Amino acid sequence: MKQNNQKLAQEWFEIGDNELGFAKAGFEELKSFYPQICFQCQQAVEKYLKGFLIYHRKSFPKIHDLTQLTKLCSKIDKRFLKFLKETDILGQYYLTSRYPLEYRPAGKFEAKQALQIAEKIIYFIRNEVSKK
């Protein structure tokens, strides 16, 4: 059973890696599409948080709320609580690309920040899973 969870978690991580890779390439090469880059960072972290939960055989609701997912991960490892502010920042980008009248579009600063946050959280999760 544990092996299946590891395999499924790895599949989630690979999708997250693709999301992050796409965001980084867009930022470095295109120097535009900043709201979409922020969205891809949100998606990458979402995949990693869900993969972490699956790795530890924990279920989660069908949500995109990074703060909620982070709180679920913190039940496994309290150190996830240090990411609540950052997941709140990234979480807004799930909405900004879909509801333009309610939110200000993200610019270059926000895209750079989103990339830094995503890389930090993903690095933490990769490290924790590789220790096991």
Image: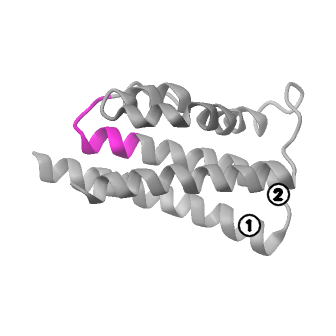
- Seen in the image, is 27 located left or right of residue 123? right
Q: Which residues are magenta?
A: 50-59
Q: At x 30% / y 53%, what residue is drawn? A: 129
Vertical relation: 100 (above or below) 29? above
User: Can residue 65 be seen?
Assistant: no
Secondary structure, mark 1, is: helix
Residue labelled with disc 1? 26
Vertical relation: 46 (above or below) 70? below
Mark 1 near mark 2, Cβ–Cβ under 8 Å? yes
For the stretch drawn in magenta, the main secondary structure is helix
Give the label on residue 33, or none: 2
Q: Position of residue 37 (x, y in %)?
A: 72, 55
- Seen in the image, is 4 located left or right of residue 54? left
Q: CA distance from mark 1 to mark 2?
A: 7 Å
- The amino acid marked with disc number 2 is Phe
Q: At x 53% / y 63%, what residue is drawn? A: 18
